[in-house]
Image (spheres, rainbow, N blue to C red):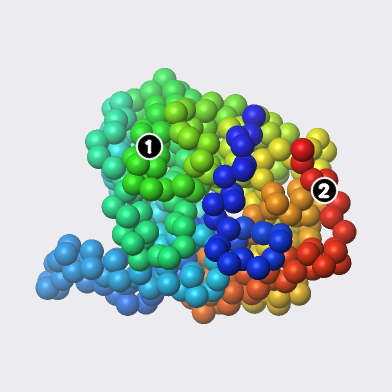
Amino acid sequence: MARSADNRAQFRPDGHDADHFLLTTVVGSYPKPSWLNRATDLADDPDAKFDDDDLREAHDDAARVITEEHEHAGLDTVVDGEMRREEMVEYFAHRIPGYEFNGPVKVWGHNYFDKPSVVSEVSYDEPWLVDEFEFTSNAASKPVKVPITGPYTLARWSFNEAYDDEAALAYDLADLVNREVEKLVDAGARYIQIDEPALATTPDDHAIVGESLERIVDGISEDVRIGLHVCYGDYSRIYPEINDFPIDEFDVELCNDGYEQIEVFRDPEFEPDLGLGVVDVHDAEVETVEEIKRNIRQGLKVVPPENLTVSPDCGVKLLPREVAYRKTEHMVQAAREVEAELDAGELDVAATTRP
């Protein structure tokens, strides 16, 4: 069942004037500065006098810039925009013993993915994300959220040459994620997001994801907020089963289909907090504040304000950077205005306050 979501209060900013509080955040990825892409190209060029230390400095600079951009937009929790990551599976596979790479695989159209293979039992060698979390935390004045690609997606989007089935691989990977979360918590992390986009394409495997999450949160304090992000898909095929997942927050992508699936989550009662996508990451048109306020009200059909988190539908890395920033800024402004309307009693909330 859902964990205690009382841990959201720690992300309420000091001096937050409104009685109500809608937690604002981003899913993870953000457009990279053009100079970082150039630095990456230079690092791959054997003729360039640009080494790993230079690339590391460029990553640090970019992470600092994007963290500051998120704070300037007014977000309650920030990330570094995943400036050090190119792809969500590949990044972790490079850090997990048992994986190897044998070249890119064509996935759709003219797009290729450097799909890894699991060739032996996976193991935990050294922390994957602690250094970047500590760097971002030192650069930020707001709490930092840490997105981690989930074990089911890491298993599903890899070639499995070592395990009897994907479930066994996912469970071993979940144990590794648990060790990483422990390291992050020791370093001060209090908001962890598990990304499981593969669940959207194979919803019948929700039990594997549920068991993987049980392993991930084993021994983790309830003071640590655990979110699960599943983008796109037919949510009716995994709801209400997700009510049994040991999570504090379930993040969904509903904006780009006009909230056609919002009713899915109204019966039976939605148990975790709802992380609602309120800006479309596939459309470069910036939503107005009023449009986003209407989207936020969709979430209030499912959960009361104290259980609603406001975010983009998914990562925004494919948008132009200025567009991503303006969407984020408008999103925060919309959340603050909805809070004021709630304080003034100007909004009817369909969802009832939980006991």
Amino acid type indicated by mark 2: Ala
Give coordinates of residue 312: x percent, y percent. Answer: 61, 62
Give coordinates of residue 98: x percent, y percent. Answer: 28, 33
Q: Nearer the viewer, residue 218 or 252?
A: 218
Q: Residues within 10 Å of mark 1 (few under 14, many from 20)?
A: many
Give coordinates of residue 82: x percent, y percent. Answer: 40, 59
Is residue 172 found left or right of 4 in the rendered image?
A: left
Q: Nearer the viewer, residue 185 or 344?
A: 344
Give coordinates of residue 48: x percent, y percent. Answer: 14, 73
Q: How far, Cα to Cα, is label 1 from label 2?
A: 35 Å
In which quadrant is the C terminus drawn?
top right
Residue drawn at x 61%, y 43% is 6
Is residue 98 found left or right of 109 in the rendered image?
A: left
Residue under label 1: 182
Counting residues from the N terminus, which is met first, the one under dot 1 or under dot 2?
Answer: 1
Amino acid type indicated by mark 1: Glu
Residue under label 2: 351
The answer, for residue 264, to whether it is visible in the render is no
Residue drawn at x 35%, y 41% is 186
- SS at badge 1: helix
Residue drawn at x 29%, y 33% is 124
Residue drawn at x 76%, y 74% is 290
In which quadrant is the N terminus drawn?
top right
Q: Nearer the viewer, residue 353 or 66?
A: 353
118 in relation to 295, above or below: above
Is residue 147 found left or right of 240 in the rendered image?
A: left
- Seen from this angle, which residue lies furthest top? 164
- Seen from this angle, which residue lies furthest bottom? 322
Q: Quadrant of residue 296?
A: bottom right
Q: Which mark is residue 88?
A: none
